[in-house]
Image (spheres, rainbow, N blue to C red):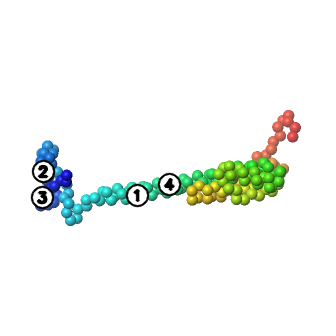
Amino acid sequence: MGRRMECGADRRTCRPEGRIAVWIARRIARPIVIRCAGPGADRGVATVWVAVAAAGLCTVFAVVLALGQAVAARHRAGGAADLAALAAADRALEGAVAACGTARRVALAQGAVLVRCVVRGEIADVTARSGFGPYLPAVRARAGPPVGPGDGASAGSRAMPVRPVPGVPP
């Protein structure tokens, strides 16, 4: 099955041996010019370059996937923390234990773990951790009633002022 070649003195031009190879060379009407195997020949170097390029592309792909997984874990933890803080703020008037219990249940429903829960008045401050692969980001969220102009908002606050609606008693 192997192909035998007869190489010239300069080892650049090789002529095929065998009936089929000679017939193909004559039909093409030109000699087959290839590099003959010998000392210093670089046969197989393309295979090495393709293998190195494929390994490099696989490495880049793995890094991109890992970064995407880290971002997804961060977003999942952020969503769980936000929802847990809203749930705790909703139950804040029932007491800190009831509010934090609700926050814990909401965080678990979102696939996260409640790390910290503090309720002061009507404001809930929670920290949730969501595990996704090797990443365990913890995200803090606060929730409470909106701050009005007479409720201690500073001049630099981004809270919108409360405007009375005409015809509706306050």
- Rendered image quadrant of residue 23: top left
Q: In terms of sequence position, does the residue under pointer 4 or pointer 2 come before the other? A: 2
The front one of 7 and 147 is 7
Horizontally, is 5 left or right of 121 in the view?
Answer: left
Q: Is residue 15 visible?
A: yes
Question: Is the Cβ of the residue at disc 1 closer than 8 Å to that at disc 2?
Answer: no
- Tell me where residue 53 appears, x and y as whole percent: 38, 57
Which residue is pictured at 74% across the width and 52% down the height? 103
Which residue is pictured at 49% across the width and 57% down the height? 63
Distance from Cα at disc 4 to Cα at disc 1: 14 Å
Which residue is pictured at 45% across the width and 58% down the height? 59
Q: Amino acid at mark 3?
A: Gly
Viewer-nearest of discs 2 and 3: 2
Q: In terms of sequence position, does the residue under pointer 1 or pointer 2 come before the other? A: 2
- Tell me where residue 79 appears, x and y as whole percent: 66, 50
Distance from Cα at disc 2 to Cα at disc 3: 17 Å
- Kindly identify which residue carries mark 2: 18
Q: Secondary structure at mark 1?
A: helix
- Tell me where residue 152 appears, x and y as whole percent: 82, 53
- Kindly identify which residue carries mark 3: 8
The front one of 33 and 106 is 106
Distance from Cα at disc 1 to Cα at disc 2: 40 Å
- Kindly identify which residue carries mark 4: 64
